Image (cartoon, helix red, strand yellow):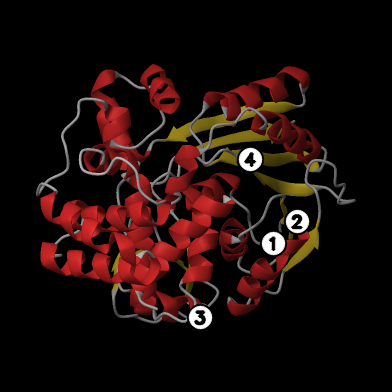
Amino acid sequence: MNAREAALSALAKQRRGGARLDAALTAAVKGLDAREAALAARLCYGVTQNRGRIDLALGKYVKKTQPQVLDILRLGAVQLWFFDRVPRYALTDEAVRLCKKTAPHAAGMVNAVLQKLPDTPPETGDLSVKYSLPEWFCARIRRLLPPEEWEPFFASCNAIPPVYVQRNTLKVFQEMPGLAAHGSVPECYTVSDPAVLDGLLRSGWGIVADPAAKRCVEVLAPEPGARVWDTCAAPGGKTLMSVFAMQNKGRLFATDRAEKLPLIREALKRCGVTNAETREADASVYAPGMLFDAVLCDVPCSGFGVLRKKPDIRYRTEVGYFPGIQLAILRNAAKAAAPGGVLVYCTCTLLPEENEGVVNAFLSENNTFREEEMTTLWPHRSGTDGFFICKLKKL
């Protein structure tokens, strides 16, 4: 199997079974080397991010076809329009080859359509179609941002983000090839070679985490010797960055659902962490039996701040149930904050009902907490993932 076959398999699995794209990709790229796996991911993301615009163009040539064939056409179109230096004959030959393996009767049609497509994607004044974003989401963003920022934000949702690695400061620093230091975030680097990244992660040199996620930990400001609870810890990035800040001293308590804990434990071991323990828990009801100097609530959310990394989120239609569970987690976590302690609430979404709405509801019923800092990181402004971060102080 090569990258294009893996991408086609992942797209089909997502379409048929409703699987998350990242999970479908993980299964599809098993056995591929790091570069082929990275190409498969870029192909899947490109199709998902641009599906509306691609289908608008394909609709002029294809009225009805099998979903698998349509996915093959989408893979061809995304390479033609959004990949550099992929000749039309090469992507067409690959598309025909894929079609002959899965739907041979349509190989001639696939060849003809890809030959007829224009050299550039169709222009449209509808930003929802141009960036393949749901109209309801675009309407919400228009109410949150000034008009001059609408298109820059929508474009950021389809950008290819840098891969950021936060260095493990528990280990002796060593120069590593293929890294570029971030200009303003300490101990943060970008890496463009998937093989280099794989080596860094395996060695425990660092972890993949966006500067926005690191900002959450900076606001939490866990100190060496502190007691810290990361309530919704998976996949473990903020847990590890907290430990790095604590210099592996004190006690960090990481909780999440049972199926998510092995990934966290593996990362802790790889990075040489000894002051953290993991435990299965529902953060909305769990009582840890002790008070903490710092509590982090990186709660489940709709994810509309990380569309550039999880493009399939754009097709989510129901987000109304998140504020209820978010408020429940915040209420419960607050009980474990020691007097004078810090409670940080954060999400990777930009929808106010999941952000300011939850914090304001919490503060309206809790006069023992004071808001100290509240910020929203917008991708087109900060170059980071979209994040909401609020720091609350226990009086």
Contact (CB < 8 A) between labels 3 and 4?
no
User: Which tag, 3 or 4, sits closer to the chain's start?
Assistant: 3
Residue 332 falls left or right of residue 193: right
> How far across and how far down the image is residue 223, in percent?
63, 56
- Amino acid type at mark 1: Lys
Residue neighbourhood size for the residue with mark 4, other residues' Cα within 10 Å, grouped as few (<14), some (14–19), many (≥20): many
Single out the mark in the foreground, 3 or 4.
3
Q: Can residue 24 be seen in this view?
A: yes
Q: How far apart are marks 4 and 1 (CA)?
A: 22 Å
Q: Which mark is residue 202?
A: 3
What separation in Å lies between label 4 and label 2 (alpha carbons)? 20 Å
Q: Which residue is labeled 1 in the image?
A: 260
> Which of the two labelled residues, at mark 3 and mark 1, occupies the earlier sequence position?
3
Q: Earlier in the sequence, mark 4 or mark 1?
A: 1
Q: Which quadrant of the view contains residue 243?
A: bottom right
* Residue at the disc numbered 2: 257
| Mark toward the viewer: 3 or 1 | 1
Q: Is residue 7 above or below residue 217?
A: below
The residue lying furthest to the front in this view is 105
Gap in Å between the C-alphas at discs 2 and 1? 6 Å
